[in-house]
Each structure stands twice: as C-alpha cells, then as structure tokens.
C-alpha cells in the first residue's frame, strides 16, 4: 500500500513545560488504513492528532523535534489553511467546531469557501446529512441540537470537503449505541469502497474493532504497543476478568422502595422552536436508587435531567424534590442537597485553578479553611487530579475536566446526584472508577440518577432502568427484570443482547 503520511516525533514540548507531551513516536499511515488510537486520560491522544493535522505547531504553539509529512509535504512548511486539501479533522468537542446558526450553513461553510457552485453545495449538504443519519435537519438551529446530533453535524461538515485523510477525535463519544454502530459501519464503507484513510481516537474501541486494521495504544505520550484488532480485544477481555476477580460491583442490587426523593407528575417540556423535549413524564425516584436513564440521541434524556434540577421549567405538570415543589423559591434549599454533572463539563467549570473550582461552593457556605483544604484534597485525590490542584482547568484533557466537574459536585456531599454521561471522554478504567464511586454512594443511602449510552454500565450498576423513546418513558423496570424486556428495548434501538460487538468467540 502507498504511504501517504509519515509521523516521526522525537519530542513535543509545550511552552513553559519541561516534560514532553509526546515522545519517541514513529509510524507511517498507508492509503486505505483504518487506524484506531486509544489510551488513558491525558495520555497524548488528542495532541498526536493535532500534530498530524498541523494544528501543532501552526495554531497550538509547541516545540516539535522531528518531522510530520503528508503526501510528501512537511507540515512545518505548510500554511494551516491548506490542510483541508489533505485532511478532514473532527475535534473532540463538537461545540468548539460549530460556527453557524443552522445546520445547512454549518455543513455548507467549507464548501462555500472553496467557491463550489450553489447547486452542488445543496446536493452535497443533503447527501452528507443523510449519510450521518440527519436527513431533513438542514433548517434545525445548531443551538437546539443534542450532543450526539451536534457530533453528527460536525462530521458531516468534515466529510463534505472530501479530503483523502479523515482524522476523528472521539467521533461517537456522545452517540447512543445504535448511532455508534451505524456511524462506524458507514465510515467502514467509505474506507473500503473509496479507499478513504481514517485515523480515529477513542477511549473505548470495541465497537470499531471490526473495521480497524491497526490499533495503537498510547501511554504517557508514547505509543507503547501496536496491536492487531484481535490481539487488542483479547487483552481487554483478560483485564475485565481480572476486574471481576477484584469484586467490583457488577451485580445489581434489590432496592426496596423507600421515601420518594424526586417525583415528576405529567411533566411535558416543549422548546421554543416547537421541538418536543419530554412528554407526559411520570417518574418516582426513591432514596437509595441507582437509576440509569437510557435512550437514543434526542429522546429527551438531558431534558429530563435539567428539569429535575430546575434548569428548565416544565411547560405543564409538576416536579417535586425532597417533597417540595420545584419552584424558584425552593430552588436554593433543594440545590444544597443536589449535585448535577453536565454532559459537557465546560458548562460548569469557571475557576482559575482546580482547587479553587472544587472549593468554591464550600467557601460560599463559609466553611473553615482547614475543612475546605481537607475536602479539596480528598476529592481531587479520589478523581486522580491531586497533582494538578494549582493548574488552570482548561489545561486539562476533556476526560480530566469531566473528573474535575465530578469532584466539584462530590465535595458538597449531596443526597441526590444527577450525572449526565459521567463516563464520557474517559477510558474504561476511569469510567469504572467513577461508577464504583457512585455505586458506593448509593449503597450508603444516596440517590443516583445516571444518564448513559453505555449499556454495559447500565446493566452492571443500576437497580432500575428507565428507557426513553420519542420523548416519553417507554419502560421503567427493575434491572433484575431486564431480560424480560430485551425485545422491547431492541425495538427502540437499545440492543442489550449485543453489548460487546467484537467477535468474542474467536478470542476465547
């Protein structure tokens, strides 16, 4: 196969840093490759992609010792605006890449800059939106998109430019299982039929292994191992078996319904653009519940969570939390005992250092400095960020910012925790660590509501599962009865039959 890119990075160091972010990286990309790069939080995955796309050093300043070439061109000598001729790049955060008010303009933006005829632009926008599963979304406002829908729109805008190399950073992190499977299949089709070269970063990669031909594992800025997909999967199965031996709580608990912590009575929410958020929601959440809410993108999961914490007011119906109506007057008292983790951690991070972020609410409450420092250290130690306590949060990776947001919630010891995709952007080990902590809180009487696309996590940790479909509750069941409802769940796009999609029989 023809080599189309050569990556030789001896060292990459950011200004005012001594430790290299990348080191000893040397590999080639061949035309038609489907390469998956994985590794732990802050291991250097996204930085490596920045280096391949020319974002480093032309946008993010860094000292790169070595050479990166694409189709014979040294990236050091290329202007950044010429990179779109060679590389289509989808960043980890879709919101950082969306610049237009509606979906049509977003997908058409790059094509317009290339002076493509309008009729051709119209057809390309239509085709790419259909390809990513968003047919008919041209007039949708980008601000109204769910996280998964925003991710698809960004991918469509990248695919529209028809570059020979596709570089994707966590392209399915906010998609539901059905959406992930569909998108991987379609990318694989482009890879096979059009010989499109794909380099993709993901924290959890089992679903894409069937389509990849190479897997790189990066640790501390260095590619420590290259796998064939089958070899990588065997390694993951071995690690999971070890986790089971260590008595991680993979078995659902039977929770006897106790007092009601939160209640939604005939709740409906409709957005200003007449899009449905939730419809006729009736839900009781009991003390000690570990309740997971699942459903396809756009089914109303995040809307439900925001309604429960008073970020949005229902169009009709009533919400009670801690036996109090969720009103403007009661909100301050209710929020003292409630923690909410946003799907995007950047929506709730605002301080200049990690310790300031975690300790902010404690200072507002007038806690003594000794208590504040102790609690900050405890929470940062738990999420593995204690060594970064003096650092600015925006210097952290996406996964680390997710951990920081969780620490800032847990420091208040809330009785009711709502977590919207708490494992998004984390590798599998970090994801299990977060779920273990939430599980332990539930065992001690806290009430947990987790929104997740990770069906494995939902099955292994929750005592109760609520499935949304078309903005309504389709199922509200005890997890011990899950097997009785697999057909219904599968019919709404939630395939619990096939949680692990790789060919496990070949790895036994």
Image (cartoon, rainbow, N blue to C red):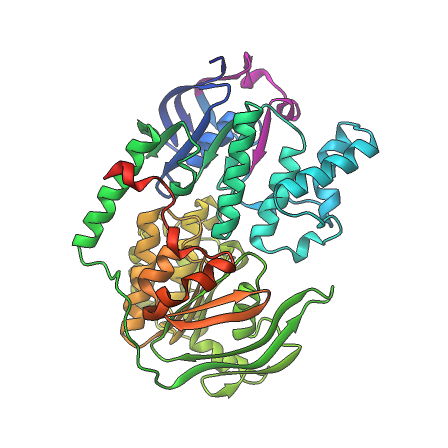
Between residue 332 and residue 267, name the one nearer to us. 267
The correct choice, above or below, for 88 with respect to 470 in the image is: above
Between residue 434 and residue 380, name the one nearer to us. 434
Q: Is residue 204 magenta?
A: no
The correct choice, above or below, for 372 with respect to 81 in the image is: below
Between residue 21 and residue 419, name the one nearer to us. 419
Side of 347 relative to 268 (left or right): left
Side of 345 relative to 312 (left or right): left
Q: Residue at x 33, y 77 (%)?
A: 288
Between residue 156 and residue 39, name the one nearer to us. 156
- How many numbered tags mark residues here? 0
The answer, for residue 380, to whether it is visible in the render is no
Side of 226 relative to 474 (left or right): left
Q: Position of residue 230 (x, y in %)?
A: 31, 32
The answer, for residue 149, to whether it is visible in the render is yes
Q: Position of residue 68 (x, y in %)?
A: 48, 18
Magenta-colored span: 65-90
Q: Residue at x 40, y 49 (%)?
A: 400
The correct choice, above or below, for 480 with respect to 133 in the image is: below
Of the 4 image quadrants, the one containing the C terminus is top left
Q: Is residue 69 magenta?
A: yes
The correct choice, above or below, for 349 with respect to 4 in the image is: below
Q: Position of residue 215 (x, y in %)?
A: 37, 30
């Amino acid at each position: 196969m023809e080599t189309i890119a050569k990556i030789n990075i001896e060292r990459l160091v950011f200004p005012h840093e001594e430790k290299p972010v990348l080191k000893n990286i040397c590999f080639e990309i061949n035309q038609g490759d489907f390469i998956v790069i994985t590794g732990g939080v802050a291991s250097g995955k996204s930085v490596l992609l920045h280096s391949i796309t020319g974002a480093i050093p032309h946008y993010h300043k860094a000292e790169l010792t070595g050479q990166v070439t694409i189709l014979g061109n040294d990236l050091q000598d290329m202007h950044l605006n010429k990179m779109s001729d060679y590389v289509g790049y989808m960043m980890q955060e879709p919101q950082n890449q969306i610049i237009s008010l509606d979906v049509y303009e977003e997908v058409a933006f790059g094509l317009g800059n290339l002076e493509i005829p309008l009729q051709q632009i119209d057809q390309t926008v239509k085709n790419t939106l259909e390809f990513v599963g968003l047919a008919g979304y041209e007039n949708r406002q980008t601000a109204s998109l769910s996280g998964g829908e925003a991710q698809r729109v960004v991918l469509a805008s990248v695919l529209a430019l028809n570059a020979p190399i596709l570089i994707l950073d966590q392209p399915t992190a906010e998609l539901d299982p059905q959406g992930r499977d569909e998108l991987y299949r379609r990318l694989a089709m482009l890879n096979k039929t059009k010989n499109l070269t794909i380099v993709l970063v993901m924290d959890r990669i089992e679903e894409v292994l069937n389509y990849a031909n190479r897997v790189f594992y990066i640790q501390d800025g260095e590619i420590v191992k290259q796998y064939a997909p089958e070899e990588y999967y065997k390694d993951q199965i071995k690690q999971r078996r070890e986790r089971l031996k260590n008595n991680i709580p993979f078995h659902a608990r039977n929770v006897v319904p106790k007092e009601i912590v939160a209640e939604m009575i005939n709740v409906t929410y409709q957005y200003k653009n007449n899009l449905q958020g939730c419809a006729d929601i009736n839900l009781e959440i009991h003390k000690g519940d570990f309740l997971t809410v699942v459903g396809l993108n756009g089914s109303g999961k995040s809307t439900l969570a925001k309604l429960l914490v008073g970020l949005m007011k229902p169009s009709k119906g009533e919400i009670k939390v801690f036996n109090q109506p969720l009103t403007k007057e009661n909100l301050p008292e209710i929020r003292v005992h409630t923690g909410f983790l946003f799907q995007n951690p950047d929506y709730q991070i605002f301080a200049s250092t990690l310790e300031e972020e975690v300790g902010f609410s404690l200072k507002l409450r007038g806690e003594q400095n000794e208590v504040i420092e102790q609690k900050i250290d405890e929470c940062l130690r738990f999420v593995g960020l204690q060594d970064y306590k003096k650092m600015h949060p925006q210097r952290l990776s996406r996964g680390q910012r997710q951990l920081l947001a969780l620490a800032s919630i847990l420091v208040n010891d809330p009785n009711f925790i709502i977590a919207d995709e708490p494992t998004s952007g984390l590798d599998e080990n970090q994801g299990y660590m977060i779920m273990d902590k939430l599980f332990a809180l539930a065992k001690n009487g806290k009430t947990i509501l987790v929104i997740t696309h990770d069906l494995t996590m939902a099955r292994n940790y929750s005592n109760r599962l609520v499935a949304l479909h078309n903005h309504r509750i389709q199922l509200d069941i005890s997890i011990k009865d899950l097997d009785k409802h697999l057909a219904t769940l599968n019919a709404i796009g939630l395939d619990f039959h096939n949680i692990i999609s790789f060919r496990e029989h070949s790895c036994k």
